[in-house]
Image: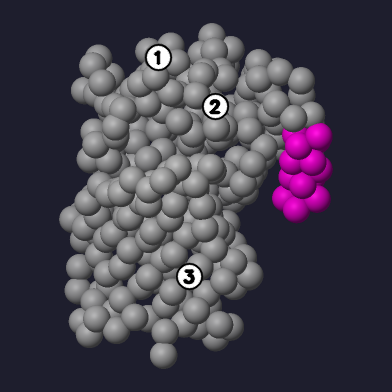
Amino acid sequence: MALLVSDREVAAVLDASTTVAAMRDALLAAHAGRLVAPPRASAPLGGGRMVLTAGQLTDEWYGYRTYDTFGHPQGEQLVVLHDGRTGVVRAVAVGEELGSRRTGGLGGVAVDALARPDAATLGVIGSGGQAWTQVWAAAAVRPLREVTVHSRSAARREAFAARVRAELGIPARAVATARAAVAGRDVVVLATTSHTPVLAAADLAPGAHVNAVGFKQRGRAEFGTDLLAAADVLVTDSPAQAMAYDPPMLAALPPYAGRLADLGAVLAGAAPGRTGADQVSVFCSTGLAGTEVFLLDRLVRVGAARL
């Protein structure tokens, strides 16, 4: 019988270290050609879209994720995991937590691979669920000593800082401007729903690493081309998906496309990452297809005794 997994089970089993490790394994599998995941597909619906991503780990499993975009960036998701040899459904996850932790885990891998080894401060613009899992995962790969947060809502940014202090045990404070959030920070997270830039590249400290999670397309992006021009290292988790964006993803357009590296290749040593302490590195997250199913498989394996 297929295992039904809720957000409560996801939260109980998938801590940050487990999630980041799974996403590192997924990126390496994709680079090696074992994780096969075509770009996402979508179908228009009244007021939104239905989005489908799918993937397979060769000779082990296959599966898919579907969600809608009715009035919010990402609605409740359905993730289905099949046994790759028999086709039997092994597990079904319903909710938001698996996808959110997947995205955070990919961001954690990027921080671990690209941020300076001594990175200890983090500034985040955004105070929603995606912002939270980015900080949650970053704290698993770097010993953060302070987090600063800015978002449009003073109440939400204060609540976010309080959550960082309570759940992660890291000193955190809310600040009134985006510039104050990123000034002097070793790691910067952009996780907003803004269609216009919320960050000026000139405000970044030398050697900063940036995870860009929100909109990043021509005509709707939470950062401008000044960030891409400032990047000494420019990386994404799926070049194929980056090239398939509609409207086009800024980092996949000239003159940046030729510099856009694959995070899996960086992890495998096949592409260069950071080579200097003062370099600015930027990770443009696309959400490599198949990684949600990869994470559900890892959850089933790790949590077999508890689920």
Q: Picture coordinates of residue 19 (x, y %)? A: 50, 59
Q: Is residue 172 above or below residue 231?
A: below
Question: In the image shown, does 272 or 70 lie closer to the viewer?
Answer: 70
Q: Is residue 159 magenta?
A: yes
Kindly tell me whether residue 194 is visible in this rendering. yes
At a point 58% along the width and 83% down the height, the residue shown is 306
**Spatial CA span between label 2 and label 3:** 29 Å
Tell me the magenta residue range.
Answer: 155-169
Q: Picture coordinates of residue 82 (x, y %)? A: 31, 76
Dot 3: element: strand
Q: Is residue 154 above or below residue 161?
A: above
Residue 93: mark in rendering: 3
- Corner quadrant of residue 252: top left
Residue on which the image places disc 2: 194
Q: Earlier in the sequence, mark 3 or mark 1?
A: 3
Amino acid type of the residue that numbered disc 2 sits on in the rendered structure: Ser
Q: Is residue 138 magenta?
A: no
Relative placement, left or right, of 170 versus 43 is right
Amino acid type of the residue that numbered disc 1 sits on in the rendered structure: Thr
Q: Find out whether the residues at labels 2 and 1 contact each other: C-beta distance under 8 Å.
A: no
**Spatial CA span between label 3 and label 1:** 37 Å
> How many other residues sit within 10 Å of disc 1, few (<14), some (14-19) or many (≥20)?
some
- Corner quadrant of residue 8: bottom right
Q: Earlier in the sequence, mark 2 or mark 3?
A: 3
Q: Picture coordinates of residue 107 (x, y %)? A: 48, 43
Question: In the image shown, does 117 or 250 lie closer to the viewer?
Answer: 250
Relative placement, left or right, of 9 versus 176 is left
Residue 225: mark in rendering: 1
At a point 41% along the width and 90% down the height, the residue shown is 1
Question: In the image shown, does 50 or 100 lie closer to the viewer?
Answer: 50
At a point 37% along the width and 81% down the height, the residue shown is 90
